[in-house]
Amino acid sequence: QGQLVESGGGLVQPGGSLRLSCVASRSISRFRTMAWYRQAPGKERELVARITRDGMTTYADSVKGRFTSSRDNARGTVYLKMNSLKPEDTAVYYCNGDEWGVNYWGRGTQVTVSS
């Protein structure tokens, strides 16, 4: 019902770019906020970017100036454009939707930054 599906991960060299997509099974307008989290091996899941219903965004300090989140309500999709990728960005990236206190998660997409 609240299915979120991520795509767009892969292997990229340092300095490269990727764009992640998160497609919702129903309208994303029902979510108060949508967000991207990531989890690296041996580390806790951390917030990367959050976008509100009206498109306001916030970012983790570690990705400010490099990552950009956007949403296309008509397509039911949220994006995370990642530029100037670093090895420390390597992680599984998860999409999250907050439907007024009820959280939905995707299964994640792997991003690996390596030469």
Image: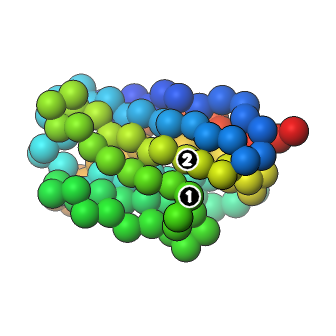
Q: Which mark is residue 18?
A: none
- The residue labelled by disc 2 is 82
In this rendering, position of residue 8 left or right of residue 111 = left
What is the CA distance from the residue labelled 1 to the residue labelled 2?
A: 6 Å
Most distant residue in the right direction: 115
User: Residue placed at 58% from the left, 37% from the top?
Assistant: 18
Residue 72 placement: quadrant: top left
User: Residue placed at 62% from the left, 40% from the top?
Assistant: 17
Relative image position of residue 44 (x, y in whole percent)? 63, 61
User: Residue placed at 30% from the left, 57% from the top?
Assistant: 51
**Label 2: few (<14), some or many (≥20) within 10 Å?**
many
Residue type (three-letter) at the residue carrying disc 2: Met
Q: SS class of the residue under badge 2?
A: strand
Q: SS class of the residue under badge 1?
A: loop
Residue type (three-letter) at the residue carrying disc 1: Arg
Q: Nearer the viewer, residue 97 or 111?
A: 111
- The residue labelled by disc 1 is 66
Q: Nearer the viewer, residue 4 or 56?
A: 56
In the rendered view, tell whether residue 23 sits above or below residue 52.
Answer: above
Relative image position of residue 64 (x, y in whole percent)? 52, 67
Of the image marks 1 and 2, the number of the one nearer the N terminus: 1
User: Residue placed at 37% from the left, 67% from the top?
Assistant: 58
**Label 1: few (<14), some or many (≥20) within 10 Å?**
few
Tell me if label 1 and label 2 are in contact, CB under 8 Å. yes
In this rendering, position of residue 58 left or right of residue 38 = left
